[in-house]
Amino acid sequence: QRAQRAKPLSRVENYVVARSQSESFALVWTPVRRYADGEVGGPVALVHVSTERFSVVALGNLRLPPDRVALRVEVVAGEEVLFAEGSQCDEGGQPGQCDTELRLMLIRGPNIVPLELRDSGNRCVGPTEFGLRRVHTEKLPNGWVRDFVLTTTVDVDAGELIARESLVATDYPPGRDESRAQIYRRSEAKRTLGFNGAYFESVRPTLWTHMRATKGELD
């Protein structure tokens, strides 16, 4: 679960994101708080823009990793859904050790609200989000380390989302000598998430949940 402790951002204007959606509509996000895990959050709005004025059509609260932010609206099963993407790299980490998250929110009337993800038993398993790129490192008993890198692509298909995942576990010796790296395991999966206008449903969990928890050990 993401940390909830937060503090105000010292220079909010450095984080304002505005993305045009059409000639008359734009998405505007103004983060005002930074959380303990490095993410930032604040109001996000769908704004109608004319030659003389603008008006807020819908408003909500969005939390994302702060870098390379992308906002767009897609229509899924007849509903407008906000696709919000952001990246974060660990300070002082290895090159390429960056996470990129995609989070989905429903635009309905004056509200922009998070979308639940439920399993086949109709149990809520959290918000609808995807690791477009997630990186995790585990120390192994022999002194080597095992890197897990998950990449995901998400496509809209009428009333469904199609998520294609690839997860690669690679072992590195002390000092991370690339020439001695060994791919330990590679897995791919396709997940279909149905949408009923209120929440998404996924029959199978993400590869990330199982493989990382078991350090990638073969079943």
Image: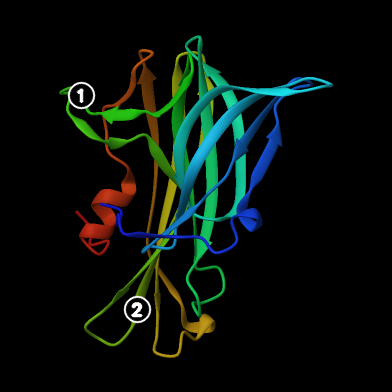
User: Real-space Cα distance between discs 1 and 2?
Assistant: 35 Å
Residue 181 in the image: state x and y as whole percent: 46, 77
The residue beneath circle 2 is 145
Q: Which mark is residue 49?
A: none
Residue at left offset 69%, top offset 36%:
19
* Mark 1 residue element: loop
Residue at left offset 39%, top offset 89%:
174
Residue 17 in the image: state x and y as whole percent: 65, 45
Q: Is residue 206 above or below residue 177?
A: above
Q: Which mark is residue 120?
A: 1
* Amino acid type of the residue tagged 2 in the rendering: Val
Q: Is residue 90 above or below residue 116?
A: below
Viewer can see residue 152: no
Viewer can see residue 170: yes
Horizontal side of 55 relative to 97 (left or right) equals right
* Amino acid type of the residue tagged 1 in the rendering: Ser
Horizontal side of 185 relative to 105 (left or right) equals left
Quadrant hosting residue 18 = top right
- Sooner in the amino-acid sequence: mark 1 or mark 2: 1
Of marks 1 and 2, the one in the foreground: 1
Report if the CB atoms under discs 1 and 2 are less than 8 Å apart: no
